[in-house]
């Protein structure tokens, strides 16, 4: 492990990790984020699960992207590795929340407010009454999986349209890992296929961009 960053540090762009990356590589051709925190918190009160899981899975990803996206070279690729659990979590949200998450005009600031509202509701014990699913992990992936990736893709299109940068979210599938367990059907090598495919999209490719990809296929959101 060459560089270690604390993804829970909102000022991580100032940390030694980023300075070392800049010093050694200057700019990057690909970013692959894969931040998961879930099962180890299952014995905690749900409000605590929500806060800690959100801080790592959503805010950590957001801060990593804020720190590293400006360092991308033209034709770079960004892959946010997530979980299709988010699609299931979205389907259990209230119609009002589903409409907000599916709104293509939703801003990053508005998404962050929604994620904060979920944590507060979870801590107060009324998240389900407010239309949220009863899963901290799944809710963080609703925010992170497609919505944040879609927003970031739109920003890149507006600010660096000529650079050909593609950013997507993907689900690697149920993979045999310490977190997912030994009964999962996919090997780590099989789980790496879709993230690798997205990271190696050829120069000049226009799509997918801002999409959720599973088994190398764009999924409906």
Image (cartoon, rainbow, N blue to C red):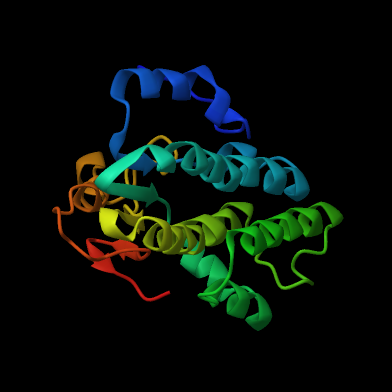
Picture quarter with the N terminus: top left
Q: State how many labels appear.
A: 0
| Front one among 170 and 207 | 207
Picture quarter with the C terminus: bottom left
Q: Residue at x 86, y 56 (%)?
A: 124
Q: Is residue 29 above or below residue 134?
A: above
Q: Is residue 164 left or right of residue 221?
A: left
Q: Measured from the top left, where is residue 205 in percent x and y?
A: 17, 61
**Image quadrant in which you'd find residue 52:** top right
Is residue 4 at least partly visible in the picture? no
Q: Residue at x 50, y 62 (%)?
A: 86
Q: Measured from the top left, where is residue 215 in percent x and y?
A: 24, 61
Q: Is residue 190 above or below residue 177?
A: below
Q: Is residue 61 left or right of residue 116?
A: left
Q: Measured from the top left, where is residue 90 in percent x and y?
A: 55, 70
Is residue 113 at least partly visible in the picture? yes
Q: Residue at x 80, y 59 (%)?
A: 121
Q: Residue furthest right?
A: 124
**Image quadrant in which you'd find residue 114:** bottom right
| Front one among 57 and 88 | 57
Q: Residue at x 43, y 37 (%)?
A: 68
């Amino acid at each position: 492990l060459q560089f270690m960053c604390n993804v829970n540090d909102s000022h991580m762009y100032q940390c030694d990790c980023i300075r070392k990356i800049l010093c050694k590589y200057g700019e990057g051709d690909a970013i692959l984020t894969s931040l998961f925190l879930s099962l180890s918190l299952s014995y905690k009160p749900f409000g605590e699960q929500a806060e800690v899981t959100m801080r790592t899975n959503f805010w950590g990803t957001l801060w990593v992207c804020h720190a590293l996206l400006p360092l991308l070279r033209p034709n770079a690729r960004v892959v946010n590795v997530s979980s299709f659990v988010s699609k299931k979590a979205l389907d259990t949200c209230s119609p009002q929340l589903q409409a907000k998450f599916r709104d293509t005009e939703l801003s990053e600031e508005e998404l962050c407010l929604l994620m904060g509202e979920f944590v507060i509701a979870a801590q107060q014990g009324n998240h389900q009454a407010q239309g949220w699913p009863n899963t901290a992990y799944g809710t963080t992936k609703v925010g992170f999986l497609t919505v944040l990736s879609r927003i970031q893709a739109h920003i890149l299109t507006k600010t660096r349209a000529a650079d050909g940068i593609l950013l997507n979210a993907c689900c690697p599938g149920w993979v045999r890992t310490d977190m997912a367990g030994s009964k999962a059907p996919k090997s780590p090598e099989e789980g790496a296929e879709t993230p690798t495919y997205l990271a190696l999209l050829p120069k000049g490719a226009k799509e997918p961009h801002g999409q959720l990809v599973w088994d190398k296929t764009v999924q409906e959101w």
